[in-house]
Image (spheres, helix red, strand yellow):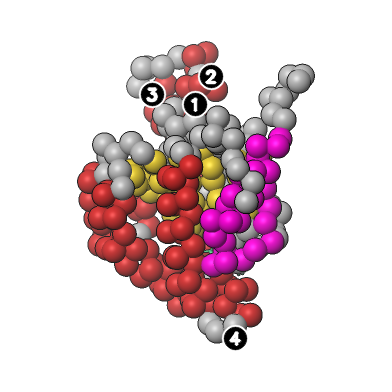
């Protein structure tokens, strides 16, 4: 494997973990089987990100549009999410990883919301890596909820409309205090954003892998970082 340039590790990597259903279908199994097998790939991605020094890893676990799936699949995903919170949080904490859930959690069961809050509280002072799990997340929702917060401040006469700028706006997104996404990876060959981090990926480098999520491993992640390290980011300027 080609060595990574340790001085050019993306600070914030976001991943659209796609292809669980197709992976299961290839094995002649139910879609849920794919989701279950995706959990190991999540573990591997988290540990690799921490190992190479990525500071923020944002994983798209459930979009605001995924409620459109059959009820049985949605509830299986919720159960997996609950289990992961039960089994993985201690390990995350031991590894100095901060866990944050990004999204509208009010639609989740009371039990799940409780687990989320406990896990976030337990890990809030950890600094090796921040792991954001986007759950019931939509990029448009994120922008709208930020606009609502600002509108309320204007109504309460705590803020002037003229003082709303990009820096202030971004402080009301769910990723406040985090750097923008440097590298966005999507697995399974699909090349679209699917309402993920719309604002935060404005200048992200995009990397599409044909691998289905349960097969995504360290070697694949390494390839994505290598590709990132070969890009010339210009941010609208010149070389
Ligand atoms: C991604 O895999 C996981 C979630 C959206 C929760 P999919 O379930 O979308 O798998 P495909 O795209 O149908 O293969
Ligand atoms: C995006 O994948 C959402 C997650 C990975 C959680 P989808 O499989 O839901 O996206 P579309 O429907 O193919 O755009
Ligand atoms: Mg999909």
Residue 51 x %, y %:
44, 45
Name the residue carrying label 2: 165
Q: Nearer the viewer, mark 3 or mark 4?
A: 4
Q: Is residue 198 at least partly visible in the picture?
A: no
Instruction: Tell me whether circle 2 and circle 4 mark residues in contact (CB < 8 Å).
Output: no
Q: Which percent across, then down, holds residue 29?
A: 55, 84
The residue lying furthest to the right in this view is 238
Q: Is residue 92 left or right of residue 104?
A: left
Q: Are marks 2 and 1 in contact (CB under 8 Å)?
A: yes
Residue for badge 4: 28
> Which residues, given as a range, are shown in magenta?
207-231
Give above or below for 71 relative to 59: below
Residue at coordinates 44% horizontally, 65% vertically from top-left? Answer: 39
- Nearer the viewer's eye, disc 3 or disc 1? 1
- Element at label 2: loop
Q: Nearer the viewer, residue 109 or 43?
A: 43
> Dividing the picture into quarters, in which one does residue 85 lie?
bottom left
Going 48% across and 54% down the picture, which residue do you hit?
45
Give the residue number, with chain letter if any, for mark 3.
153
The residue singled out by tag 1 in the image is 169
Q: Earlier in the sequence, mark 4 or mark 1?
A: 4
Give the tally of numbered discs: 4
Q: Residue at x 26, y 36 (%)?
A: 125
Tell me the crowding category of disc 4: few under 14, some 14 to 19, or many 20 or more residues within 10 angstroms, Cα based. Answer: few
Which one is earlier in the sequence, the residue at label 2 or at label 4?
4
Q: Earlier in the sequence, mark 3 or mark 4?
A: 4
């Amino acid at each position: 494997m080609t060595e990574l340039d340790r001085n050019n590790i993306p600070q914030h990597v976001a991943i659209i973990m796609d292809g669980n259903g197709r992976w299961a279908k290839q094995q002649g199994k139910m879609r849920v089987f794919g989701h279950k097998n995706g959990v190991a790939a999540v573990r591997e991605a988290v540990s690799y990100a921490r190992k190479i020094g990525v500071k923020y890893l944002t994983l798209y676990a459930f979009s605001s549009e995924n409620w459109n799936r059959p009820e049985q699949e949605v509830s299986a995903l919720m159960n997996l999410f609950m289990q992961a919170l039960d089994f993985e949080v201690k390990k995350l904490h031991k590894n100095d990883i901060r866990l944050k859930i990004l999204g509208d959690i009010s639609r989740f069961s009371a039990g799940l919301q409780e687990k989320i809050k406990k896990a976030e509280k337990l890990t809030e002072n950890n600094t090796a890596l921040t792991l954001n799990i986007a759950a019931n997340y939509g990029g448009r929702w994120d922008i709208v909820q930020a606009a609502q917060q600002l509108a309320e401040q204007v109504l309460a006469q705590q803020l002037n409309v003229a003082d709303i700028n990009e820096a202030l706006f971004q402080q009301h997104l769910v990723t406040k205090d985090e750097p923008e996404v440097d590298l966005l990876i999507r697995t399974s060959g699909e090349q679209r954003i699917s309402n993920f981090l719309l604002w935060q990926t404005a200048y992200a480098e995009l990397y599409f892998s044909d691998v289905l999520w349960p097969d995504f491993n360290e070697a694949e992640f390494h390839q994505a970082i290598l590709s990132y390290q070969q890009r010339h980011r210009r941010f609208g300027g010149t070389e």
